[in-house]
Structure formats: C-alpha cells, structure tokens
Amino acid sequence: MKTVGDYARLSTGELIERINHRKKELNAVILGHNYQQLDIQAVSDILGDSLALSQEAADTDADIIVFCGVHFMAETAKILSPQKTVLMPDPGAGCPMADFVTGDGLRAMKAKHPGAVVVTYVNSSAEVKAESDICCTSANAVEVVETIPADQPILFVPDRDLAQWVIDRTGRDNVIPWEGYCHVHDDMVLDELEFAKEDHPNALVVIHPEARQELLDQADIVTSTSGMVNLAEEHDELIIGTERGLIDKLQKEYPQKTFVPLSKAAVCGNMKANTLEKLAWCLDNLQFEVTMPEDIRAKAELALRRMLEVSGSWQGSPEEQEKLEMAGIRSEGCGCG
C-alpha cells in the first residue's frame, strides 16, 4: 500500500485530479470546514460550519462522507448519517476544547448536580453528547438556554467563554460552566484588537463568542462563524476575531473587500492537519473510518435532535416526531427535567 509520503510526490494538479476522480467513483461528498486551508476548501463540495455541514451531508445521496475538519465534526456527521460511511483524512485532527470533557468526567459532574440540565456545545465528542440533555451551537446557545425553566440549574459543557456569553445575554445566575475553552479564541487579547482598530478605525468589529468576555465587550457584533460569513456579504471592512482560515476564505471570495484578522496568531493546527495528500490517500484507501457504538450514537442524536427541534431547523418525519414526543420534547422548549 502506498503511503501518504508517496502522494506528497504528486503535483497539486495531480492530487486534485485524483481526488475528483475517486470522489465520483465512490459517490462521496467532501465536507470542508471554514477553517480549512484554501486548497482543501477548493476541492470541498460543501463549505461551512461543523453542524451545518453534517446536516447538508445527511441530505445528499452520497454513500461516503469525507469530513475535512476535526474529530468531533466527523462524529457528528456519523451521528446524523448512520447509514453512510464517514471518513477523516487525518484521525489525529482533534479538538483541544472537546478534550476538556470526557463521558466519565461529565457523569461525575452530573452526580454532583443531579437536578441540572446538561447543555452541551456541539464542539464535543459523541460520548459527551450522549450524556447530555440537549446540544447547542454558538449561534443558538442563548435560544436553547432560554427554553429551560429559569429556576433549573444548567451544566454548560465544555466552553466557559461561550457559557459566560450565555450568562450575560440571559441574566441567569444558575449556569455552571465547564472549565474548558478554545485556545485559538481564548488566546486573543485586547492589545491585538486595539492595534487592528488603529489601522482600520472604520471597520466593524466582529468576534466569535468563544473569545474572552473582555474582548466580546469591545465587539460591534458577537456572532458565529456562519454569522460572520453573512456579515461579509453586507460590509466592506471587518475586523474578525476567529480562526485565520475564515479570513482567508472570505478574502478569496471578496477580493475587493478588507477582512482583518483580530489576531494573526489565531491558527488552529488541528484544522490545518488535513492536506490534499492525506485527502487523496483517504479516498483511495477508504481510511480513516469514524465509528461508534450504536447506543452512544442514538443518545447523541437525541441531544442533537432536541436542539434542532428547539431552533426550528429540523423537520422530522411523523415517526421521528413521535420519538421526540416520547422523550419529552416539545416544539416550544427542550422539555428537559
């Protein structure tokens, strides 16, 4: 069997040709997260945020999903498309924030707070999702929390910065944050923002809610990655506080506009682990496959479906709706607790 090193000897054009040929041969769809390198984005069939990518892939007739992102994202694709084969070009592409919490750790915390609802950010493993009552994204975290009775405690997993943003937006004093964080966003500091504003005084400051509160307080808009993409359509000059891959993507899409990274050091090495060589090798060898026990997958799916029901972004079949009703979920709220 050829190694990835053998593929590194091929030219970019040869790799792209090989990827496109093999993709058609396998009836595969390639998903590229917004933080991927530009050459990976260029060969991706669908670009976007992690959950949206998994949802779109589930709606395709593809037999194989190749997720160019990090491990929890590929797991989410498998959760929502159990009948499809899900592959990752680099199985070592993990997420340090997701690694802050394990199933055992969450079970121990739940035992300390037996009446609390567990709200878990989608940036988490399938095992952690399976231990959760409901998931959320950075875009709908506030909405999800607001469906839970005001007097009911909430364990918010695993991002303390997103949890603080939710606390500030909802005014709740019974949200218990897990002490995890995204190092890419958490490492951004005020000095960097001040330098960017000095050079671009008329730019709109847009920051991801995974950043520290002191930065969010200085933002014109706090929004998710998908929200930033939408803002790029409407504005000519943005200072963007998130991973550099998104800025590269937007600058390529809108070369006449100005997109300034809040921090030039905001780079996720895990996201950049995927390369054309690894992607071509992955397709040729059908490696590396993402699997999980069915009981974990089903429980994790329920937590995701609860969120999608709350946000109105999922319309299930009558059978699936009945499954949710039996689990205590109603369209007007998560029904947790």
Image: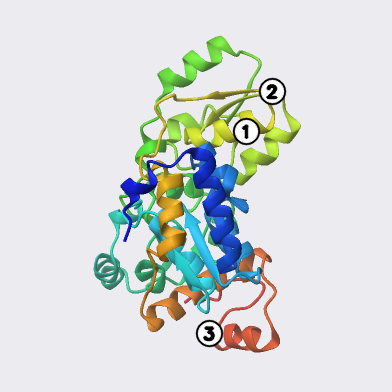
Determine crowd level at label 1: few under 14, some 14-19, many 20+ residues with C-alpha closer than 10 A: some
Mark 1 touching mark 2, by CB under 8 A? yes
Q: Disc 1 designates what residue?
A: 250
**Amino acid type assigned to the residue bearing label 1 in the image:** Leu
Indicate the quadrant containing the N terminus: top left, top right, bottom left or bottom right: bottom left
Label 2 sits on a secondary structure element that is: loop
On screen, 170 above or below 25?
Answer: above
Q: Can residue 292 be seen?
A: yes
As measured in the structure, the alpha-carbon distance from the residue carrying label 2 to the one carrying label 3 is: 48 Å
- Closer-to-camera residue (302/70): 70
Label 3 sits on a secondary structure element that is: loop
Instruction: Kindly report which numbered mark, 1 or 3, lies closer to the viewer in this rendering.
Output: 1
Work out whether mark 1 precedes mark 2 in sequence or the reverse, and give the earlier one: 1
On screen, 249 above or below 177?
Answer: above
Q: Say the numbered circle drawn on residue 222.
A: none
Instruction: Kindly report which numbered mark, 2 or 3, lies closer to the viewer in this rendering.
Output: 2
On screen, 116 above or below 243?
Answer: below
Q: Say the numbered circle drawn on residue 327.
A: 3
When asked about the image quadrant of residue 264, the answer is top left
Work out whether mark 1 precedes mark 3 in sequence or the reverse, and give the earlier one: 1
Determine crowd level at label 2: few under 14, some 14-19, many 20+ residues with C-alpha closer than 10 A: some
Mark 1 touching mark 3, by CB under 8 A? no
Please indicate whether residue 9 sits to the left or right of residue 109 in the image: right
Q: Can residue 224 be seen?
A: no
**Amino acid type assigned to the residue bearing label 2 in the image:** Lys
Q: Disc 2 designates what residue?
A: 257
- Closer-to-camera residue (292/226): 292
Residue at the right extreme of this rendering: 234
- Closer-to-camera residue (4/141): 4
